[in-house]
Image: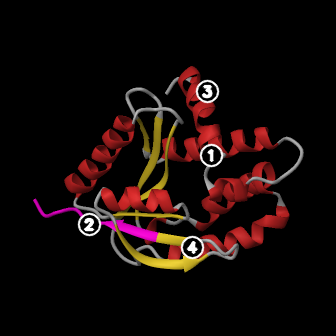
Amino acid sequence: MSPTQKATLLEKMVPILKDIPTAVELVKKGGDEERRFRSLAKYLVDKALKKDALIVSDDGNGIAILFRTSRADANFWAALWGELGLIWRVTGLRKAWQLYQVQQYVKKQRPAEGEYLYCWFWGVVKGTPTRTARLMKDEFLRRSQALQLPIYAETRMPKKVLVYQRYGFDVFHKWTHPNGETVCFMKYIPPKP
């Protein structure tokens, strides 16, 4: 990805992040919030590029991060270094502990063994035709079926739960987030070939 393509992608991603409750919660309030959202977008994209997990629609208005991963894949020290950068540039120290606890709970909902695909981020620029989201969904499901790996995702947005369910995901767990919102944990199991 060229620097120009990456800059364009980040410009499209920032407004999407501002509509996602988890992202809004991550970003420290006050001061230069715009810069913090941009840093968060850069963090997400850099991590996705490193793991070959970035999916961008043909029109550039759909962006997703779909990791192929497992519980054994976690490298504590590498993750800690990345998280420290995120805390310093985006969240601030006050939110760090609460966010860490929430993320530990979220991670425990994923499989303890075996590989799976994890949808870390999926957003579409406002005003984009629904065709873009459908084509991206088709790509997720194609990868899941080709690899015969389930896809895991979670969201606090009731509209998105309905979209995931329409695309074949099942809600397997609900949890009340510390802020009172319901988090729905979902999975998609690919059909056997």
Q: Which residue is mark 3?
A: 7
Q: Which is more foreground, mark 2 or mark 4?
A: 4
Specify few, some or many for label 2: CA neighbours under 10 Å numbering under 14, 14-19, or 20 or more. some
Spatial CA distance of label 4 from label 1 is: 19 Å
Q: Residue at x 85, y 41 (%)?
A: 32
Q: Which is more foreground, mark 4 or mark 1?
A: 4
Residue 88 at least partly seen: yes
**Of the residues under marks 2 and 3, which one precedes in the sequence?**
3
Say which quarter of the image contains residue 151: bottom left
Q: Which residue is mark 1?
A: 17
Spatial CA distance of label 3 from label 1 is: 15 Å
Query: Which amino acid type is shown beneath numbered disc 1?
Result: Leu
Say which quarter of the image contains residue 4: top right
**Of the residues under marks 3 and 1, which one precedes in the sequence?**
3
Check disc 2 and report its element: helix, strand or loop: loop
Q: Which residue is mark 2?
A: 189
**Of the residues under marks 4 and 3, which one precedes in the sequence?**
3
Query: Which amino acid type is shown beneath numbered disc 2?
Result: Ile
* Magenta residue span: 185-193
In front of the other: 170 or 82? 170
Q: Residue furthest left?
A: 193
Numbered tag placed on residue 182 in the rendering? 4
Q: Residue at x 49, y 78 (%)?
A: 174
Q: Position of residue 13 (x, y in %)?
A: 59, 38
Spatial CA distance of label 2 from label 4 is: 23 Å
Spatial CA distance of label 2 from label 3 is: 35 Å
Q: Residue furthest top?
A: 4
**Of the residues under marks 2 and 4, which one precedes in the sequence?**
4
Are dots 3 and 1 in contact, CB under 8 Å? Answer: no
Q: Which is more foreground, mark 4 or mark 3?
A: 4
